[in-house]
Image (cartoon, grey):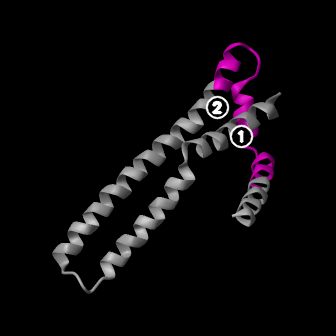
Amino acid sequence: MTIIGALVIVLGFIILINSFGVMQKSKLVIENTQAAFLTFLNKDINDLQKEIALQKYAKVLFFHFLLITLYCIIAIVIPISIIWLMDLLGIIALKNVIDTTCSWQFLALTGFISILVLIKIRKNE
């Protein structure tokens, strides 16, 4: 039952991250960072124009940072809360689930599976 609880945490996190669109927002961060860098290198505009443009990029990037952070917090809190409620009901021990989730065997296995899934996703794009 402990391994199922650990899988609920990991799979729940992945599903929620995906449903919140965190990966798409991360791509926007990369695009905005590249655009800001190109603005910084642009020799056709003066320093004041660069500063104004870079401040706009900084605000957008900071907003995305806050949003991604919030979504990640929510994505981890929800699955752990489910396990916590199950612990309160005596169905499963939260400590055991956390211990399993943090074990090197579980981390290695889920890491390996994640890499395989990412490779498959990249090939389909």
Q: Which residue: 75% across, 44% down?
A: 103
Identify the image quadrant of the C terminus: bottom right
In the figure, is residue 87 to the left or right of 64? right
Whether residue 40 sits left or right of residue 123 in the image: it is left
**As displayed, is residue 17 above or below residue 24?**
above
Say what secondary structure mark 1 lies in: helix
Using residue 38 as the reference point, say whether residue 53 is left or right of it. Answer: left
Question: At numbered mark 2, what does the secondary structure look like: helix, strand or loop?
Answer: helix
**Which amino acid lies under the numbered mark 2 shown in the image of this protein?**
Pro
User: Number of callouts in the render?
Assistant: 2
Please name the residue shown 83% across and 27% down the image: 1
Residue at point 41%, 67% (across, down): 33
Q: Give the answer, above or below, for where 6 lies relative to 21.
A: above
Residue at mark 1: 11
Q: Amino acid at mark 1?
A: Leu
Where on the picture, by quarter, is residue 82?
top right
Q: Main secondary structure of the magenta part?
A: helix
Find the magenta span and give its range: 82-111
Image coords of residue 57 (percent x, y): 32, 63
Q: Are marks 2 and 1 in contact (CB under 8 Å)?
A: yes
Please state if 24 lies on the left or on the right of 56 as rendered. Answer: right
Question: Disc 2 designates what residue?
Answer: 79
> As rendered, which of 71 and 104 lies closer to the eye?
71
